[in-house]
Amino acid sequence: MRILFIGDIVGRSGRTIVTERLPRLIRDWKLDLVIANGENSAGGFGITEAIYRELIEAGVDAITLGNHAWDQKEALVFIERAPKLIRPLNYPAGTPGRGAALIETKTGARTLVINAMGRIYMDPLDDPFAAIDRELIACPLGSGADAIVIDFHGEATSEKQAMGFFCDGRASLVVGTHTHVPTADLHVLPGGTAFMSDVGMTGDFDSVIGMAAAPPSFTPPPGQPAPTSVDGTPAPTAVPVPLVPGFGGAVDRGLGGLPHAGRRLVDLFVDRVGVCRHGFSLRTCARRGRG
């Protein structure tokens, strides 16, 4: 199974590069599933129904959110009729929408997509570890879903790494979002779960986490920052994790000799993760494992 995860889409420039490039990526990479974090897609703050539909029409199969989920108040209403829009699982009971969704891939496989938010330097929500644990018990990897992808939206690298080990062997991929800066720790954990502390953003590279750079000052300017106005600037950190294995039930050999939970395994070899202002320049080599 080939899954593309796209980091936080920021404003118009982020949306433009996704709508322009994604259809070709789906075709060329033969992608089974595309997941994107869209919490900054509406001018850097939240998501609208029109943008949700725009991303779905471009080929995104599931859209996750985070602490900006409700910045556009219409999201509180339209999320109920947007089955592929997933807000943090650990919001209080009664919050509109859903924190997990079972998405069918293009080949008919079932992928459980979970979104949760950390609590260190973030909003004081319910315990994300307990919330995700309940979800993984209710829909276990192998019997309940062919693959499980967790978008853990948080500030602290330590909390994200803790979540990776907490879900190791029970999920296909645990990836962090929120900081808009990619980390250099993409690897496979001992139990077979692929992990990256933060996948980065999809937006204008010449910016401050996607926003227009303010003049040098020790005092931030008043009001909310605005996303850059450059249209169609390629996102240099859009796809640090282009392919991840879809794990099954058994234990098999995987990347670097580490065990993977799955019979139908795709070994992932990332020869070079590099992107430039001229577009995606990411070379990968996927080799099917025996099992």
Image: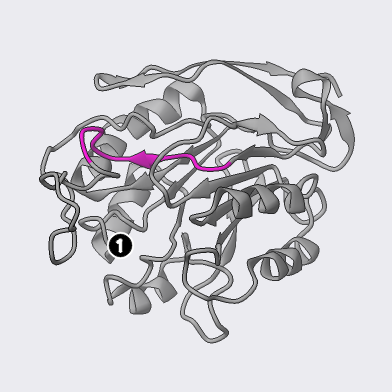
Viewer-proximal residue among 111 and 181: 181
Front residue of this view, candidates 181 and 15: 181
Residue 228, position as x, y percentages in the image: 15, 44
Q: Is residue 110 left or right of residue 29?
A: right
Q: Above or below — where is 61 with respect to 115?
A: above
Q: Residue lying at the far bottom in this picture: please name it.
A: 94
**Residue sitting at the far front:** 218
Q: Is residue 40 left or right of residue 5?
A: left
Colour scheme of this structure image? one colour
Left or right: 47, with 195 as reference point: left
Which percent across, then down, holds residue 191? 82, 39
User: Label 1 amino acid?
Assistant: Ile
Predominant secondary structure, magenta span = loop
Q: Which residue is labeled 1 in the image?
A: 47
**Quarter occupied by the C terminus:** top right
Characterize the local packing of mark 1: few (<14), some (14-19) or many (20 or more) Cα atoms within 10 angstroms.
Answer: many
Q: Residue at x 28, y 75 (%)?
A: 74
Residue 272's place in the image compared with 83, above or below, is above
Q: Position of residue 172 (x, y in %)?
A: 69, 42
Q: Which residues are magenta?
A: 197-207
Res 43 quadrant in image? bottom left
- Residue in view at x 37 percent, y 54 percent: 38
The residue depicted at 57 percent of the width and 29 percent of the height is 243
Q: Tell which of 192 and 17 is nearer to you.
A: 192
Q: What is the number of callouts on the image?
A: 1
Work out whether residue 16 or residue 84 is closer to the camera in this orientation and state it.
16
Q: Is residue 206 magenta?
A: yes
Point out the image quarter for the N terminus: top right
Task: Say what secondary structure mark 1 lies in.
Answer: loop
Answer above or below: position of 204 versus 283: below
